[in-house]
């Protein structure tokens, strides 16, 4: 592409257009190479990305236009090519009414194409700056379509693969609104996996939904004037149940991830002991997906420990999890190639949580600074992390205030 102007959409010949389609879509798929099978040692037998060439070649305009929009913007952003990015917005403008027309027909055969279009528009808004929080409607749109299809329809095939892909985005969006997502229900956490086993990424998203459930309950108790949320039997049970599951997750899968343990520079020998910090392993990352995966695990632990009392007993462990998130972010930022485009996106939730819930204050400031560096790069997605009061920020401030008061009292 270097030195060659981007094609004009109105005059490109079919053969040349197909060549550019292949270039942009191949780059988009390659960008997922380290993330598409995250948490699955052998990879899923199929992936939603595998269907993109077929959707692009089909007659349905909605998925075709959406695929072009997202893949061109991905490529144009990486290549800093203004003309390709401009053409991507043209295809986005065509994709929106095409998708509305598909949804208006509302017939089951068009479900896969509509879902594909919505997913690709969601990814378009990861980089685009079309409007504030424009990423959110597309996430909600995909989830609404999957919800209408029902959990049984998400057990196999394209809908299953998209469901597995979008669960984390659904969790992120719900946390921005301080609510519990419908996908956190027992039915949605079990039925779609009756025929295809969960990967350890799927199980980690399960843990995030369980933590979201704990946060929603604690937030409700705080607003009802309960001073010590841990006295609530339901919340206490959920927290310790989630902690047991995350420890079991680590024990089962750390060898599968095939990473070596190491101590963080400057950390005392005692703090790396599993008996001292049973849920923690210091891990040398070898891939972007591994760094993002393990940082999600640290995010789960950080949030669960913050909900426990008394806080001073857990502050060192909380600090280590926050440090691990920042370390993973540094690794991801240094990644070369197409994966570098998606790697930072995979760290936004972890950094947001660390900026609100981390310890000490220096770690929170460092996490917020890392988020600030991403703000100029990402559009509709990044604005989701700027939601005032989102990610249970009021609860975080209340927990940190109580922890400070308790520390001073002791």
Image (cartoon, helix red, strand yellow):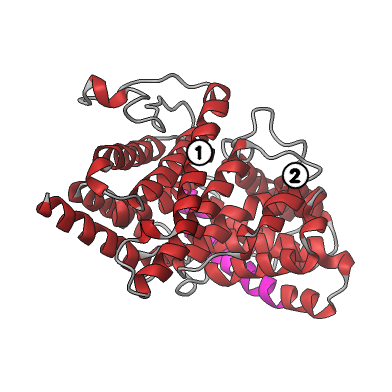
Q: Which one is in front, 240 or 352?
A: 240
Q: Position of residue 18 (x, y in %)?
A: 75, 52
Q: Residues within 10 Å of mark 1 (few under 14, many from 20)?
A: few
Label 2 belongs to which residue? Answer: 50
Label 1 belongs to which residue? Answer: 244
Task: Give the extent of the magenta segment.
Answer: 76-97
For this view, does 47 lie left or right of residue 326? right
- Picture quarter containing residue 209? bottom right
Q: From what the image shows, is residue 56 above or below residue 8?
A: above
**Residue at left 84%, top 78%?**
105
Q: Position of residue 257 (x, y in %)?
A: 54, 26
* Main secondary structure type of the part rendered in magenta: helix
Q: Position of residue 68 (x, y in %)?
A: 67, 59
Q: Nearer the viewer, mark 2 or mark 1?
A: 1
For this view, does 194 lie left or right of residue 49? right
Q: Position of residue 211 (x, y in %)?
A: 48, 53
Q: Which one is in front, 392 or 370?
A: 392
For this view, does 15 lie left or right of residue 250? right
């Amino acid at each position: 592409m270097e030195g060659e102007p981007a094609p004009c959409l109105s005059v490109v010949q079919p053969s040349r257009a197909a060549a550019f389609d292949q270039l942009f879509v191949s780059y988009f798929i390659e960008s997922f190479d380290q993330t598409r099978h995250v948490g699955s040692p052998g990879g899923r037998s199929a992936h939603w990305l595998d269907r993109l060439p077929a959707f692009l070649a089909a007659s349905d305009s909605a998925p075709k236009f959406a695929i072009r929009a997202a893949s061109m913007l991905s490529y144009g952003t990486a290549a800093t090519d203004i003309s390709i990015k401009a053409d991507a917005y043209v295809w986005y403008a065509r994709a929106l009414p095409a998708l509305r027309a598909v949804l208006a027909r509302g017939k089951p055969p068009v479900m896969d194409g509509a879902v594909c279009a919505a997913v690709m528009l969601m990814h378009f808004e990861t980089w685009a700056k079309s409007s504030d929080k424009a990423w959110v409607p597309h996430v909600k749109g995909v989830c609404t379509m999957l919800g209408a299809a029902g959990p049984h329809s998400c057990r196999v095939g394209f809908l299953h693969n998209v469901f597995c892909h979008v669960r984390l985005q659904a969790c992120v969006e719900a946390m921005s609104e301080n609510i519990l997502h419908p996908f956190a229900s027992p039915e949605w956490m079990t039925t779609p996996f009756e025929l295809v086993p969960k990967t350890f990424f799927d199980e980690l998203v399960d843990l995030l939904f369980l933590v979201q459930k704990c946060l929603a309950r604690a937030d409700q108790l705080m607003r009802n004037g309960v001073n010590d949320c841990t006295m609530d039997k339901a919340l206490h049970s959920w927290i310790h149940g989630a902690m047991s599951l995350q420890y079991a997750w680590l024990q089962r899968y750390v060898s599968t991830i095939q990473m070596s343990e190491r101590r963080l520079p400057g950390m005392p020998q005692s703090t790396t002991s599993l008996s001292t910090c049973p849920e923690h392993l210091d891990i040398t990352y070898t891939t972007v997906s591994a760094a993002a995966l393990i940082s999600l695990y640290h995010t789960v632990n950080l949030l669960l420990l913050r909900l426990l009392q008394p806080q001073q007993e857990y502050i060192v462990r909380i600090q280590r999890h926050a440090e691990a998130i920042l370390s993973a972010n540094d690794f991801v930022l240094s990644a070369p190639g197409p994966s570098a485009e998606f790697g930072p996106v995979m760290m936004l939730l972890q950094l947001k949580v660390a900026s609100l819930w981390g310890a000490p204050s220096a770690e929170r400031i460092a996490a917020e600074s890392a988020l600030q560096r991403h703000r100029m790069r990402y559009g509709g997605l990044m604005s989701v992390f700027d939601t005032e009061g989102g990610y249970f920020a009021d609860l975080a401030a209340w927990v940190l205030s109580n922890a400070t008061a308790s520390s001073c009292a002791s």
